[in-house]
Image: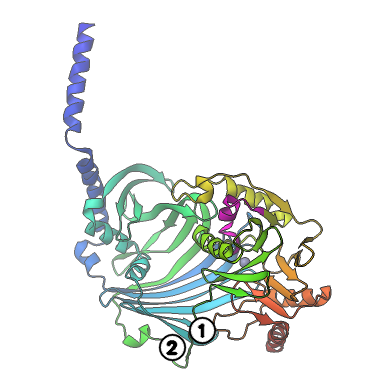
Amino acid sequence: MKKAIYLFVLVLFFVQVNFSQNITKQSYEKAREVLDKAVAAYGGLENLRGIQNFTLRAVGETVQRNQSRKTFTADRTAYQIDVTVDMKNNRFVQIVKGGYPGGFSYHNGFAVDKTDGVTFDLVRNTFVVRPNIQAAAIRFRQRWIPQYWVLNAVERASRLRYAGKTEFDRRPHHAVSYANEDGAENTLYFDEKTGLLSKFEGLGSDRFFGDSVFEMIYPAYRTENGQPIPTGRISKINDELTEELRFEQLAFNTSLTDDKFKVPGGMKEVTFPAPQPFNKISETVYTVNAGGYNVLAVGFKDYVFVMEAPGGDQISRQAIEQIKKIFPDKPIRYIAVTHHHDDHAGGLRTYIAEGATVIAAPGEKTFFERIVKSKFTIEPDPLALNPKELKIETIQNGRRVLTDGTTTVEILDIGAGPHAEEMLVAYLPNEKMIFQGDLLNRPPNGDFPIANDTTVHFAKWIETKKLAVEKIIPVHGPVTTIDELRTAVKAKETAQK
Ligand SMILES: [Zn+2]
């Protein structure tokens, strides 16, 4: 018995000696050991510091996590990015080609020289000058390559911590974490055997599902000119794929000309006017600008109906503030969204916190239930701070009418189209107007809309329903007339012939 106590005291003594070393320093030293091995695996510190520029072509697919035709499914669309980052001269250029389900495609560029930026649209051949670009924009692009992560962690050594040993992709890994210049904490997973970076991840808040892990994975490497080159990059949010790319080209320190960082020749400069805070359509019907999106607000006798909750909580709060200025004494009783995509419903939780009942298509109910139940502890939004049950009324037989005798809104489901399986629009018969999302988009400067498969489907639906429509109000872009819609559809049909 006495012997046992003696032994216990002895053990305690040694444990204490161990801990007096300081756990922060210990953690750093362990992380440093892992990182030093990684530095060696990438050819040494001199080699890493010698990377003055890189040119990358990544090709693959976007997995449409919150932009698919149906809730809880993942449609895929082709994606390609060409990016050149010139760290030495503090500039970059990228050209991206991608799309969304329903015939949406984009092909655009972004070039930045120090703080002077320019975005360009290779479909319309236009460009917009963007001054005051933050340094974070170039850092964000540097993060394409694992070599940057290793160097960045070395240069921010006091933030380095050892996170633990773990299995990843069935191989043992050491994980270290550090905080980058943007204040984001990242965990880097290094393969125990090769010392190479297999993935980096961070915690953040997703506008639909709250507390989330964001992962970027380098699935494999090949060696080129003695350098380990990742074969691609996979992105995941909460273990759900969001992007799968292979690196078709990655070259370091190529000779770069100034022209590469300029707008391609023959493009027209356009300016995007600052949006008005709101647009009055009639005494009771308004659209409100929320982060560049149009939100419909209709004041009935006793309450306000809002359609569309784009973006996220911040944009919703901005919209609600404006709506309350327009209709000071009326509660927002109903919120509807055109469809479940995050740029249309991402701010829904804020309206639910406000006490609004959601009017939705039947297939979206389960999705919205999950959004309301999600945990938001990292960035608590108004619903996290003031939890409320979801009040939801689904549309029956494709139609729901709100009216006080004077003002009328018909919420109509246009049915399965190329962009979404269920799609609501607001038809205002007195105003001869339709408010819609993604069925017809238009650039903010009012350049003519370009019709796609989704636009054609929508135009046909209006004709079939024989609705008296003069004006179409897009969530994305300025007011469009029915004649402009018809002209855009005709232009597409002519181009196809
Ligand atoms: Zn959409």
Mark 2 and mark 1 residues within 8 Å of each other at the beta carbon? yes
Residue at the farthest top position: 1
Q: Quadrant of residue 293?
A: bottom right
Looking at the rendered structure, the kind of residue marked 1 is Leu
Q: Is residue 195 visible?
A: no
Residue closest to the eye, 18 or 286:
286
Residue 101 in sight: yes
Give above or below for 62 relative to 168: below
Residue in the image at 43% along x and 64% along y: 232
Q: Is residue 387 magenta?
A: no
Drawn side of residue 488 relative to residue 149, left or right: right
Task: Report, in whole angstroms, how far the alpha carbon at label 2 lies from the one at label 1.
Answer: 9 Å
Residue 410 location (% of width, % of height): 76, 65
Q: Quadrant of the C terminus?
A: bottom right
Disc 1 crowd rating (10 Å Cα; few below 14, some 14-19, many 20+) is some
Which of the pair 206/355 is nearer the observer?
355
Q: Which residue is mark 1?
A: 122
Instruction: Report the residue at 21% width, 21% height from top.
Output: 11
* Residue 163 against residue 1 in the figure, above or below: below
Label number found at residue 264: 2
Where does residue 308 sit, x and y in percent of width and height? Answer: 62, 63
Quadrant where ligand 1 appears: bottom right
SS for callout 2 = loop
Q: Secondary structure at mark 1?
A: loop
Residue 324 or residue 209, whichever sits in front: 324
Residue 419 coordinates in the image, percent (x, y): 67, 68
- Magenta region: which residues? 344-357
Left or right of 156 in this view: 84: right
Tag shown at residue 219: none
